[in-house]
Amino acid sequence: MIILRLQQIRDAQRFFEILNNPNFHYFGSQPESVEAEIAWLEGNEKRFSEHKEWNYTILKGDDIIGGIGVKINQHRSYIGEIGYFIDEAYWGQGIATEAVRLLEEICMQELRMTRFELLMLPENIGSEKVAIKSGYRKEGLLQKALLHKDGSKRDCFLYAKTL
């Protein structure tokens, strides 16, 4: 069982470790230092208060095992784009699927969202499995829509779910 809590500055070291795993080929963010991760986390309060993003830490017991968040569409606030990352030690255990479900519940209750979107690189089979298990449907391929950590713009699948 996992729980979600709002991200905190003290999560920076653990997030830095998880995000800098060389096996993270598909995730778009890779902080250059713990200080850079702290700076990003410090911006969460502003993004939250401006109703732009809500970001959570994924906990299993007392252990930080990942992060998940929703970017709120600024023109259609009932739409949210979900993104997540999970420590490699927990891949394939249904953690991301459970975290997506928990975040959807928060977004429906607190933000009254009715549409959720997941963007992923076509080669990211793990995220595609999470989308399908979570009840999302593939809506198409978006060309040059995802900024990759190497600076290139990459094609991505758009999966969506409406409630």
Image (tube, helix red, strand yellow):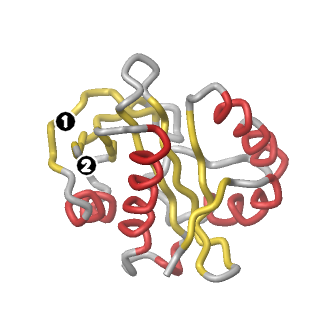
- Which secondary structure lies at badge 1? strand
Image coordinates of residue 72 in percent, x first then y, are 47, 32
- Which tag, 1 or 2, sits closer to the chain's start? 2
Q: Is residue 4 left or right of residue 161?
A: right
Q: Is residue 135 left or right of residue 69?
A: left
Give coordinates of residue 114: x percent, y percent: 30, 39
Query: How many C-alpha atoms fall within 10 Å of the one at disc 1: few (<14), some, or many (≥20)?
Result: some
Q: Are marks 1 and 2 in contact (CB under 8 Å)?
A: yes
Residue 141 marker: 1
Q: Is residue 71 above or below residue 35?
A: above
Q: Where is residue 87 in the image (x, y as percent from the top left)?
A: 55, 71
Compared with 73, 45 (above or below) is below
Density class for disc 2 (Cα within 10 Å; few <14, some 14-19, many ≥20) is some
The secondary structure type at the circle numbered 2 is: loop
Percent position (x, y) of residue 11?
Answer: 75, 60
Q: Which residue is identified by label 2?
A: 122
Q: Which amino acid does label 1 sit on?
A: Leu
